[in-house]
């Protein structure tokens, strides 16, 4: 902890100003005092990019102003005098030459662009990166970690697996020295909301999905969530980082929740069980078997008790006991806060 | 992660070879391969001390041999050729001049000796310290952290608060950037065992305490546990480290469980509640109100569900949601493993 010394200035560039990026900018403004007093940090946005283009100012943009623009549904390219309509994000990042690159573009498991290209550029230039996007890690975890190691900089990604829940940090740091025998996770909020609503209100999958959409808990195209790919992407990141197992999506046996009916849920309930979309890694010989499946958990299982708004993970280890962590996360704020904790982790003293 | 390079040798001295110290030595031996492969570390004991004296060998003692001696109830001073009967621990530490001091002496909240003196010596000489003892932190947290900062070395203590449960790491690292509004913890295993046994088997406090003793879950002098001081010591460490609030035991309102009767438990149960010894920090204005009390928690409260073998903590924050972590910890292994994780944290790459 630093006290009574002037804070270290970190000039950052952010790509993506949606649910997470916008809230991160809001935290940069609201937590300014804590960042300086506790961690000796002063975060200054020198560039920001969204689908409209970018805004660049080496002297610093106003984080609160960007938040206000995004809340008014304006593109950042309209930022007075600093706006650069249509400027491509990689070019904007290159021009900004920041101390830190914050990546918060929408998830895309196809080619992970433009996030992946930007992260490669940043790490290649020796710029630390904090990302909230799963795509680049899903497609290129080993490459990016190797690039970071060769450049001697950090790549923070604790926000990518269940947002504020310290799934990755817990596994990598707090279980260090032990061997993980089993990981069980409820890592996707949308499917947990849908399954909980189906069970509690007797709705069909389609009705519960419609309800989730009405309340803003499901995307217009919900397939990433309901077909299990979001949970699988998170499991891949856990397997790669915590289990030290290079993994691709093809290594994971994935089944979504479209086939779950009220009858399945009622049947499970009569047997004292609850159906959840479980991401699972089981140690088999010297490897792990990885899967995402709707799974009937005993009602006393700590993850069976999760409500609509919760996500959770349980690690079973050889020497560190069994550790379960659960987060109440009704909105995207904890994910944005997780991006900030990674920034503090990389730069804080 | 280091691969294909020779591991870094860390010559360490350990004080205290009881439940935790002995198991730590066992892990040093059993996890040797993982430590080298994953973290680039080779841990070599060059000194060890217990109530019999010490053993010192600059070329390295055999960790497994020390474990075998302690399991056979022999003092380490009897170590062949390296044994030094009656040598005081501070002198032994000074002679060893290690790269790391591991402190695992029995808890002592009175003067915290000999641990406190040893930690002062080590930090003063620029030697990193990992401790499993609460005493030194309870009596001198600010002094020791200041000393570590001035010497530019780390003082790891994640094992002191509920052993393997990453209570402190979660609060300090994973909630970084947020403000904690409330901490609730079930941080003492003995009292949780006693209260659970009283509730489940209808025993009186004295009967349940006797049962805990028979099973090895209570000390001969159980007052540190049952009068709430162990939980208070842990809360003090959380307040000092996570809440950034310099704290003494006198700041905490402490009540143990001797006054809890089967009638209280039954009454609570009828109201849908469970009585637990709750360590609590509540944000009030710009400060925290700290207490340890037998507390009736709603049965749906995540900490009300803890079984005899579990400990847990719940952090309520402003920006990071509400995070609960629970550990199944039926024996001292996870605490010893937590000492190892701190060593990895200080030296690992």
Image: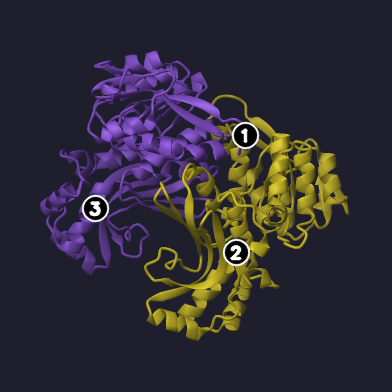
Chain colours: A purple, B yellow
Q: Please tell me the numbered disc located at residue A193.
A: 3
Q: Distance between the residues labelled 1 and 3?
A: 44 Å
Residue occupying image coordinates x 49% and y 83% = B264
Which quadrant of the figure contains the N terminus of chain A?
A: top right
Q: Distance between the residues labelled 2 and 3?
A: 36 Å
Q: Which percent across, then down, holds residue A73?
A: 22, 32
Q: Which percent across, then down, holds residue A10?
A: 49, 26
Which chain letter goes with mark 3? A
Residue mark closest to the camera, 1 vs 3: 3
Q: Nearer the viewer, residue B59 or A88?
A: A88
Q: Residues within 10 Å of mark 1 (few under 14, many from 20)?
A: many
Q: Nearer the viewer, residue B68 or B207?
A: B207
**Residue tagged 1:** B41
Q: Which of B337 and B181 is in front in this view?
A: B181
Q: Nearer the viewer, residue B34 or A43?
A: A43
Residue contact at pointers 2 and 1, CB within 8 angstroms: no
Q: How crowded is mark 3: few (under 14 residues within 10 Å), some or many (20 or more)?
A: many
Which chain letter goes with mark 1? B
Residue occupying image coordinates x 78% and y 40% = B124
Q: Which percent across, then down, holds residue A303?
A: 35, 57
Q: Which percent across, then down, holds residue B21?
A: 69, 53
Q: Residues within 10 Å of mark 2 (few under 14, many from 20)?
A: many
In the rendered structure, the answer to whether residue A126 lies left or right of residue A121 reads right
**Residues indicated by labels 1 and 3 sit on the same polypeptide chain:** no
Q: Please tell me the numbered disc located at residue B231.
A: 2
Which quadrant of the figure contains the C terminus of chain A?
A: top right
Q: Is mark 1 on a helix, strand or loop?
A: strand
């Amino acid at each position: 902890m630093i006290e009574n010394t002037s804070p270290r200035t970190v000039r950052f560039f952010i790509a993506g100003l949606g649910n997470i990026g916008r809230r991160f900018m809001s935290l940069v403004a609201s937590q300014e005092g804590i960042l300086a007093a506790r961690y000796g940090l002063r975060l200054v946005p020198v560039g920001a990019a969204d689908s409209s283009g970018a805004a660049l100012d080496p002297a610093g943009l106003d984080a609160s102003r960007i938040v206000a623009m995004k809340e008014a549904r304006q593109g950042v390219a309209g930022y007075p005098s600093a706006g650069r309509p249509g400027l491509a994000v990689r070019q904007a990042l290159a021009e900004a030459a920041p101390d830190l690159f914050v990546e918060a573009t929408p998830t895309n498991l196809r080619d992970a662009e433009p996030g992946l290209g930007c992260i490669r550029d940043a790490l290649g230039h020796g710029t630390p990166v904090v990302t909230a996007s799963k795509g680049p890690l899903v497609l290129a975890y080993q490459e990016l970690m190797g690039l970071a190691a060769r450049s001697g900089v950090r790549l923070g990604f604790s926000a990518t697996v269940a947002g504020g829940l310290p799934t990755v940090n817990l596994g990598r740091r707090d279980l260090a020295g032990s061997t993980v025998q089993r990981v069980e996770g409820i890592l996707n909020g949308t499917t947990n909301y849908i399954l909980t609503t189906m069970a509690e209100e007797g709705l069909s999958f389609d009705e519960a999905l419609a309800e989730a959409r009405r309340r803003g808990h499901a995307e217009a195209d919900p397939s990433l969530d309901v077909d299990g790919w979001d949970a699988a992407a998170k499991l891949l990141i856990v397997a790669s980082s915590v289990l030290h197992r290079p993994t691709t999506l093809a290594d994971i046996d994935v089944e979504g929740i479209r086939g779950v009916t009220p009858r399945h849920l009622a049947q499970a309930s009569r047997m004292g069980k609850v159906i959840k979309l479980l991401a699972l890694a089981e140690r088999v010989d010297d490897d792990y078997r990885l899967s995402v499946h709707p799974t009937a958990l005993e009602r006393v299982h700590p993850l069976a008790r999760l409500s609509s708004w919760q996500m959770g993970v349980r690690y079973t280890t050889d020497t560190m006991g069994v550790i379960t962590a659960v987060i109440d996360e009704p909105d995207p704020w904890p994910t944005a806060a997780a991006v900030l904790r990674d920034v503090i982790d990389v730069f804080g003293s």
